[in-house]
């Protein structure tokens, strides 16, 4: 196995800012939530996916959506991408969906203005009336590292200068 990346927490200040943006709650102890964040892990030696663990308890009724600040960023070698998906069981049992279908985390995202904070926006797309309950500390999405190539005539030299959507239409 190639070892090409490492997960870290974003700063407390970045997490607090994004937490308030996502949930708007100030009555909770955001510092305790931050301190309890667990870095993504593989469940077994043969697992491809790194499970991300929810920083808070979540309840999603059918059709409801929530944006979750994971508190995580990822440093990875150039030529690799981290692709985030719902955990298989949640997708199969509840039709849990990522709103962007697959979360693409580029290797240079870690240097963005939001410290590369990986956010996840999920929807309970159940057509069976099932409510999803995700307890704090439970895996809810998984990330898989993939190596990628580029075109022979690729001359892109632009650098990332922001967070989500900051690479659109830039470069040569």
Image (cartoon, grey):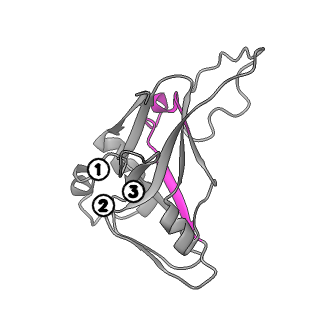
What percent of the width, then of the height, locates residue 148? 62, 29
What percent of the width, then of the height, locates residue 56? 33, 63
Mark count: 3
Q: Quadrant of the N terminus?
A: top left
Q: According to the image, label 1 marks what residue?
A: 38
**Foreground tag (2 vs 3):** 2
- Residue 51 vertical placement versus 110 (above, below): below
- Residue 162 vertical placement versus 23 (above, below): above
Q: According to the image, label 3 marks what residue?
A: 20
Residue plotted at (66% across, 24% down): 149
Apparent side of residue 133 relative to residue 28 in the rendered image (left or right)? right
Residue 161 visible to an observer of this rendering: no
Q: According to the image, label 2 marks what residue?
A: 137
Apparent side of residue 170 relative to residue 58 in the rendered image (left or right)? right
- Residue 123 vertical placement versus 130 (above, below): above
Residue 57 visible to an observer of this rendering: yes
Between the C-alphas of marks 2 and 3, the distance is 19 Å
Residue plotted at (74% across, 30% down): 169
Q: Are marks 1 and 2 in contact (CB under 8 Å)?
A: yes
What percent of the width, then of the height, locates residue 11? 31, 39
Q: Earlier in the sequence, mark 1 or mark 2?
A: 1
What percent of the width, then of the height, locates residue 146? 56, 35
- 44 or 70, which lies in front? 44
Magenta part of the protein: which range? 105-124
For mark 2, give the secondary structure. Answer: loop
Q: Earlier in the sequence, mark 3 or mark 1?
A: 3
């Amino acid at each position: 196995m190639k070892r090409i990346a490492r997960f870290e927490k974003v700063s407390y200040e970045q997490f607090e800012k994004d937490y308030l943006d996502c949930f708007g709650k100030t009555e909770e102890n955001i510092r305790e939530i931050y301190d309890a964040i667990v870095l993504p892990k593989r469940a077994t030696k043969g697992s491809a996916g790194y499970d991300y663990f929810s920083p808070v308890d979540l309840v999603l009724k059918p059709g409801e959506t929530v944006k979750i600040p994971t508190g995580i960023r990822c440093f990875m070698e150039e030529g690799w991408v981290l692709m985030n998906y719902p955990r298989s069981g949640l997708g199969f049992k509840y039709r849990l969906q990522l709103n962007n279908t697959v979360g693409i985390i580029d290797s240079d995202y870690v240097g963005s203005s939001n410290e590369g904070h990986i956010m996840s926006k999920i929807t309970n797309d159940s057509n069976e009336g099932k409510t999803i309950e995700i307890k704090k500390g439970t895996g809810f999405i998984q990330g898989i590292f993939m190596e990628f190539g580029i075109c022979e005539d690729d001359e892109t030299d632009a650098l990332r200068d922001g967070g989500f959507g900051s690479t659109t239409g830039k470069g040569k």
